[in-house]
Image (tube, rainbow, N blue to C red):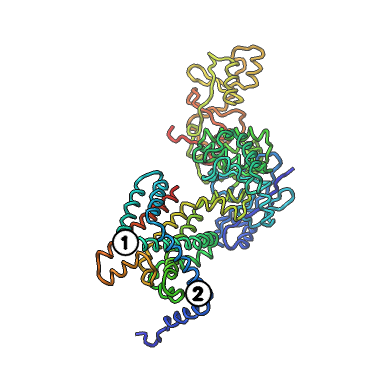
Amino acid sequence: MPVIEVKGLSKVFGKNAKESLNLLDEGKKKEEILQATGDTVGVNRVSFEVNQGEVFVIMGLSGSGKSTLIRLINRLIEPTEGSVMIDGEDLAQMDKDNLRRVRREKLSMVFQNFGLFPFRTILENAEYGLEVQGIAKEERAKKAKEALELVGLGSYVHQYPEQLSGGMQQRVGLARALANDPEVLLMDEAFSALDPLIRKDMQDELLDLQDSMKKTIIFITHDLDEALRIGDRIALMKDGLIVQIGTPEEILTNPANEYVERFVEDVDRSKVLTAGHIMHRPETVNIDKHGPRVALERMREEGLSSIYVVDGHRNLKGYVTADDASEARKKEIKDLNEILRTDVPKVPLDKPMQEIIEIIYDTPVPIAVVDGEKLKGIIIRGSFLAALAGEGEVKTNV
Amino acid sequence: MFDFIPKIPMANWIDTLTDWIVDTFAFIFDPLKNEFGDFIEWIADLLASIPPFIIMLLVVVGAFFITGKKFGLAAFSLVGLLFIENQGLWTELMSTFTLVLTASILSVIVGVPVGILMSKSKVAEAIILPILDFMQTMPAFVYLIPAVAFFSIGMVPGIFASLIFATPPTVRFTNLGIRQVSTELKEAAEAFGSTGAQKLFKLELPMAKGTIMAGINQTVMLALSMVVIASMIGAPGLGNPVVSALQRAQAGAGFVAGISIVILAIIMDRYTQSIYKK
């Protein structure tokens, strides 16, 4: 059952909103409208539903309208047109008192730069949403403490935000949002200001929390890897439009081709970058030394479903899957050769990204990047798309 | 040249306007002039009747604690106040202090709400900004004339003129301080369902506090700089010896009164600064 239904939601920044909307109906593009009316189209007739307990990720590059969209949902920005239905009420139409009530009871927001009040303690920050509702001091302190315990900050209640690290500050932001016990959490680039390792921890923690809380979450990000990691469904935005909505699997296996092409057009990285630029360090096992038990252990540690197999000179021999390895261990097979698969998708170091596109959607395992016979690295789908979109960690001087 | 344009009787119009205001609003000006004036003078007299060493003690001990238990300001206050007392200017000091304090408090009472209004409304800002510019650039002597017309001579017109001259920084800094609160924090307050008043009192004013206090510090300093000018319309205080020294070309007497104003200025400046730096 959908908790939030967004229908035909639009935002035009400027003075000639009506005219601009008409031009949009005629199929004019964002730039043409800017020239004709001087208005900027932020969000263009966006519709989607978010179901109870779902993590719905809105992903787009900067300027795609994703931050505007999330602010239209709780009306921090007034929509020009369209509706946002929550429990049968249209947020876009309601008066100020009702809007305030919905914001207090049903929607909470987590901000990119945390949005904590520097002159309030951690506890006072977490209490804020309850305080404005006029809830008695003991009760709100109790609820805020519970929320802080939930994010692992139970012992920091009397510190001030500046005394905490970025990751901890964002936990406070999350606790403040959870203290209200909202139906929907709006998270605006919530982890983007954190450094990569902390970001990954926070993603894991959010997923853990989500397992027990089953909140409905709308999560904005520009990071495709993050979107793929945490999203139940992902909406891809470009120029204020939602280009595609689907599960991570659907997005990866069946991308709106035009969109990927346009990415390529825009940045033209695919012609420039090669396999060597975008590959990652591979996890491997040594065929001469290791057996299925080690392979399985390593896959478990790294959270992989398959692992590459090399010999003592790092020559690529093939790969084993987790299923096969677990089977082999039960049968007490000691030799990796017996379960080795050799149908490896291989590309040389200097293969351009453009030519890898065709391979990457068909392969069940990461692509092996080889120099002669030697395994140099692997390419996984998520980082491939991210590199294409200009967001991945790209080593330019390999 | 341009003789064909007759001279616009601007000065006459202003005179007429001033007369009209005096007649029409006498019911406001008279109680201000009489009751309020008496009240202010009563305070000044009260301060002057307290033995100087008690006030010195309060100021020195206060200075010690307000600066974080440092001796600098306390020592300076002690020496400075002893010097003023020694020069026989203690009563004048108390009058000046009363005038500056009253003008500053009134400036804050008027200035902070006006600054809040400005920060909330672009229209209000567009209207008020040029008025503030006008208040600050018009030579201060010019206020004295209507001030005398409204309140005759003495402490009250001095406070009135100081008020006009000294209020703008409080207004400007309040406006600035509130506008400087980051968009994300304002969004956070709104996203959690704050009312306008909750946003103002729970977020914006606490965030702007330092900036507003800096504005109040400026207001106090400007009020103090009006002391000499106010004494030309009979406001009692340290300005009087300066003005009479000027008329009699007594460099020494002028300097002594001047240095007393500087001592008061430094003490008041450091006091207000230590409050907003906390």
The image shows residue B244 at horizontal and vertical percentages of 30, 70
Name which residue lies at 56% across and 62% down. A37
* Residue A283 or residue B163, whichever sits in front: B163
Residue B196, located in which quarter of the rendered image? Answer: bottom right
**Type of amino acid at the residue the image marks with label 1:** Gly
Q: Is residue B55 visible?
A: yes
The image shows residue B239 at horizontal and vertical percentages of 34, 66
Name which residue lies at 49% across and 57% down. B174
For mark 2, give the secondary structure.
helix
- Mark 2 Cα shell of 10 Å, populated few (<14), some (14-19), many (≥20): some
The image shows residue A372 at horizontal and vertical percentages of 48, 24
Q: Chain of mark 1?
A: B
- Mark 1 Cα shell of 10 Å, populated few (<14), some (14-19), many (≥20): few
Quadrant (top left, top right, bottom left, bottom right) of the N terminus of chain B = bottom left
The disc, 1 or 2, on the residue closer to the chain's N-terminal end is 2
Is B209 above or below relative to A220?
A: below
Q: Are marks 1 and 2 on the same chain?
A: yes
**Type of amino acid at the residue the image marks with label 2:** Asp
Q: What label sits on residue B88 in the rendered view? A: 1
Between tags 1 and 2, which lies in front? 1
Q: Chain of mark 2?
A: B
Name which residue lies at 63% across and 54% down. A10
* Residue A377 or residue A108, whichever sits in front: A108
Decide: marks 1, 2 in contact (CB < 8 A)?
no
The image shows residue B97 at horizontal and vertical percentages of 40, 60
Q: Is residue B75 left or right of residue A292?
A: left
For mark 1, give the secondary structure.
loop
Report which residue position mark 2 lands on. Answer: B30
